[in-house]
Amino acid sequence: MTQTHWNDVGIDYDKVLGTDASNVALLSAAVDLLPRDAKDVLDIGSGTGRLTSMVREALPGSEIVGIDPAPNMVQAAEEKFADDSGASFTGGTVEDLSQFADNSFDVAITSFALHHLELDTYDKSAAEILRVLRPGGRFVNADQFCRVMGPAGSPERALDVLDLLTAKARHYLLHASFERMLLQVDLLPRFMREDGEILTTPEYWADALSRAGFRSVTIVPTPPEELMNRVIWAEKP
């Protein structure tokens, strides 16, 4: 996640994703899991601040810090929240949260971001999230997943990802917008090569959280379930 092609995105990301009811449902389910007494929130992979806006609405008195590896997206979020003194944004990645002290946040939340991670960084990333959360703090991950793990390019895994993403493209064309469908199609080669877009099963993430020391790891499907959008949440003991 240290390098990201999302720094060069040439679309109105918020507008395009806003046409996608499945994505709205995913983010809404994640925000519904926020403890309403949370004061300090870390938004991982905050992008243009789309999820941050929903967090702000749910937690109007909280302090929110967004972190993202794409400088252009950090700038876009800063501009969007220029009048919000309780929201700040910085560059960085989930694998290295060293700019934050232990026990700094009540909640860490993320959406459509952590599937950019290389698989060998999951344990380190989960450990870093655990470290920066306070005891009893909650991690909420809203993302897209697949059904089959295996070596990149293996027929079983490649067919699963291909079938899933082409079904998604068709769904977006029929139920979201032409632009949302195009975004999915444009990214398809990256998903197939696992070049900055690497799907895992929900259980793969859940296992990493459990190994890091999280408790009560829960996987929540969001509609339509066949698109494999899921919210995974867990708590620090």
Image (cartoon, rainbow, N blue to C red):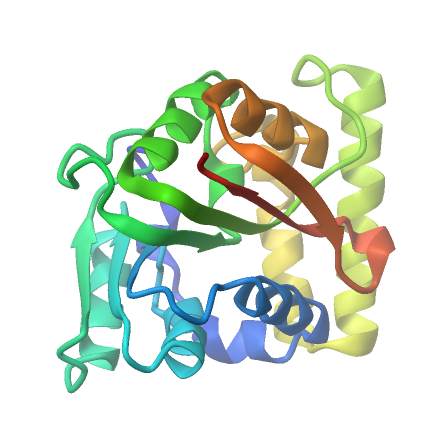
Quarter location, residue 199: top right
Q: Quadrant of the N terminus?
A: top left
Residue 179 rendering spot, x and y as whole percentages: 61, 73
Tell whether 59 sits left or right of 171: left
x 84%, y 29%: residue: 159
Foreground: 161 or 141?
Answer: 141
User: Where does the image place residue 201, in percent across and percent down from the top left?
Assistant: 71, 32
Is the C terminus in the top left, top right, bottom left or bottom right quadrant? top left
Where does residue 174 sit, x and y in percent of width and height? Answer: 83, 75
Numbered disc total: 0
- 172 lies above or below 191: below
Extreme residue toward the bottom, this view: 83
Query: Please, is residue 87 above or below residue 227 in the view?
Result: below
Q: Position of residue 77 (x, y in %)?
A: 26, 70
Of 193 and 140, the residue lying toward us: 140
Q: Is residue 17 left or right of residue 226?
A: left
Q: What's the residue at 52%, 21% (across, down)?
A: 119
Residue 11 appears in the picture as rendered: no
- Observer able to see residue 187: yes
Query: What's the residue at 38%, 25% (across, down)?
Result: 127
Give the residue at x 46% y 75%.
Answer: 14
